[in-house]
Image (cartoon, grey):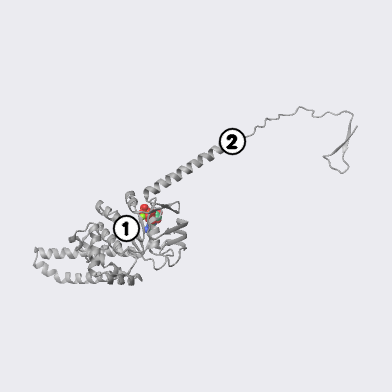
Amino acid sequence: MLYLFGKMPSDSKKKREQKKKEAAKNRGNKKPQNAETNGATNGVSEENGVDDDRCNDVVTDIKEEIEALDIADKHRSVTGVLVSHPDSRDVHINNLAITFHGAVLLQDTKLELNVGRRYGLIGLNGCGKSTLLRALELKEVPIPDHVDIYHLRREMPPSDKTALQAVFEVDQEQSHERLLDIYEHLDEMDADKAEMKASFILHGLGFTKEMQQTKVKNFSGGWRMRIALARALYIKPSLLLLDEPTNHLDLNACVWLEQELKEYKRILVVISHSQDFLNGVCTNIIHFHLQRLKLYGGNYDAYVQTRMELEENQMKRYKWEQDQISHMKTLTFYFPSCGTLPPPVIMVQHVSYKYADDKNYNKYIFKT
Ligand SMILES: Nc1ncnc2c1ncn2[C@@H]1O[C@H](COP(=O)(O)OP(=O)(O)OP(=O)(O)O)[C@@H](O)[C@H]1O
Ligand SMILES: [Mg+2]
């Protein structure tokens, strides 16, 4: 499932299947014609066009089928307790734990997401950052219904829509309560404005006017990733989850995206390996480390500084403790060996003795 709001893929699949049937039918009818017009460029390009379509369709079908399997999702178990108010736009989760195939990725930790904050999620490769975003997207943690989420992790699937349409029609593809809000919003903002807004976003991501009118299926994966990103920026969800958004962008587009995200008024959680990008965008850093999430204030540089100071303090404390321990070692007592006593210890003369009357054989009674 590529997007949170899942109606579109099944509709598009139906359309594609219909198209495939028609294409197959046409091909069947056209064969003799092509043979007649053998060598005519028109015929060849038409045939190629159909082949391209079929290729795209097959690729998309395979992708959809793999996604439909949701293999990874089935093997994830997530628990957590919502501690923020259910009507609040902030999301605070306590006792968050995620296991994947029985391996613990997170345990007994806290996730605090506040409106107006832009969080950079960092951690070692394979620690579970993408898994956490996926769990948030699917609301496997108790996130209130009114918090709409958009998770960008894959490129826009190929389609006959133009890049521009793919962006400004994204609202209509969503089957979500938020639709009412959006339609109200769209009533205020006439269709031209919606198109202008979509065009502005695409332009920022490097699409010329001509490219904006090009069909999505004619773009490479990298550019379709940009279209998916443009859709995310167009919707402006309450919780925007971006997994490595700069991967397919050139420098200009990165700079533009940084500026755009800096103004993000809702909640943004972004995974990025680019320190410059995290510095430009983030107000907070969440460090995914040793199965816990640790929140730091400020951008990436501030996080590095804070961690350095913390580590320095820890080191100072460690040294102090070691000093104390070594000092304690110098206070050890020395007991010299007493050696063996030469016999006799006591010598008595002219004394008789017997055991005590109470039969305690440790007691002797001496008599002179
Ligand atoms: N589809 C999958 N099949 C098998 N294992 C998976 C799958 N997806 C994730 N994992 C495993 O789950 C763990 C967490 O993976 P995840 O992709 O969330 O890490 P990450 O922090 O996003 O890594 P990276 O920084 O490389 O993107 C890893 O150990 C990974 O091997
Ligand atoms: Mg990842």
Check disc 2 and report its element: helix, strand or loop: helix
* Label 1 sits on residue: 263
Between residue 21 and residue 347, name the one nearer to us.
347
Q: Is 178 placed left or right of 158 in the picture?
A: right
Which of the two labelled residues, at mark 1 and mark 2, occupies the earlier sequence position?
1
* Label 2 sits on residue: 329
Q: Quadrant of ligand 2?
A: bottom left
Write the residue at 45% across / 65% down: 85
Quadrant of image for the N terminus = bottom left
Write the residue at 45% across / 63% down: 84
The three-letter amino acid code for the residue at tag 1 is: Glu
- Structural crowding at the residue carrying mark 1, measured as other residues with C-alpha within 10 Å and reported as few (<14), some (14–19) or many (≥20): few
Q: Position of residue 51 (x, y in %)?
A: 19, 64
- Number of numbered labels in the structure image: 2
Q: Position of residue 101 (x, y in %)?
A: 43, 58
Above or below residue 11? Residue 285 is above
Query: On the image, which quarter does residue 67 sit in?
Result: bottom left
Q: Is residue 84 visible?
A: yes
**Badges 1 and 2: C-beta atoms under 8 Å apart?**
no
Q: Position of residue 21 (x, y in %)?
A: 22, 71
The three-letter amino acid code for the residue at tag 2 is: Lys
Q: Is 34 placed left or right of 165 in the picture?
A: left
